[in-house]
Image (spheres, rainbow, N blue to C red):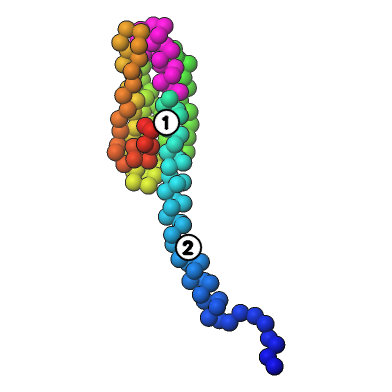
């Protein structure tokens, strides 16, 4: 009577093939989700700038510079932020999926009386990562 216990080489190879297939499917999806997470800071920072601008426009009937509205450009590993009195710009430092390094996203402030409106623009490949922008 054979009492040896364990797995055969064929069983182990089948398990390795299954793990390989699962990894092939999961890794690209993980990288896409990771890029979206890195890009997701832009709408938050832009919304902060827009909120401060809107408050300033209500008081002064014009868009203001950073010191006037109380905005400080944050530091980031993924984006460089710059602003003028009317334009917020986020420039990608590194490639994020199809969004290549050096591509920009912008929010433009326009004051009409005491009401502010904002227009978003930028590279289509970067905007694809951020449907809400």
Q: Which residue is mark 2?
A: 22
- Dot in front, 2 or 1: 2
Asked whether disc 2 touches disc 1, contact meaning CB atoms under 8 Å apart, the reply is no
Q: Which mark is residue 54?
A: none
Q: Element type at marker 2?
A: helix
| Residue 60, magenta (yes or no) | yes
Where 82 falls versus 102 (above or below)? above
Nearest the eye: 83 or 6: 6
Q: Earlier in the sequence, mark 2 or mark 1?
A: 2
Q: Residue at x 42, y 35 (%)?
A: 79
Q: In this orientation, does residue 102 appear?
A: no
> In the image, 118: left or right of 8?
left
Q: Image quadrant of residue 91? A: top left
Q: Which residue is mark 1?
A: 43
Q: Residues within 10 Å of mark 2 (few under 14, many from 20)?
A: few
Q: Residue at x 36, y 28 (%)?
A: 89
Look at the magenta stretch and give its main secondary structure. helix
Return the x and y of residue 47 as percentages of the image width and height: 43, 25
Q: Element type at marker 1?
A: helix
Where 73 falls versus 28 (above or below)? above
Where 19 falls versus 46 (above or below)? below
The single residue placed furthest to the bottom in the displayed view is 1
Magenta part of the chain: 48-64
């Amino acid at each position: 009577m054979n009492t040896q216990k364990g797995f055969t080489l064929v069983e182990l190879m089948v398990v390795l093939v299954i793990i390989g297939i699962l990894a092939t499917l999961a890794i690209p999806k993980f990288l896409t989700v990771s890029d979206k997470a890195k890009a997701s800071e832009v709408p938050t920072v832009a919304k902060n700038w827009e909120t401060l601008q809107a408050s300033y426009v209500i008081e002064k009937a014009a868009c203001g510079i950073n010191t006037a509205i109380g905005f400080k450009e944050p530091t980031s590993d993924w984006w460089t932020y710059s602003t003028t009195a009317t334009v917020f710009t986020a420039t990608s430092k590194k490639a994020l999926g199809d969004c290549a390094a050096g591509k920009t996203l912008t929010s433009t402030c326009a004051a009409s009386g005491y009401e502010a409106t904002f227009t978003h623009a930028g590279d289509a490949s970067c905007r694809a990562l951020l449907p809400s922008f």
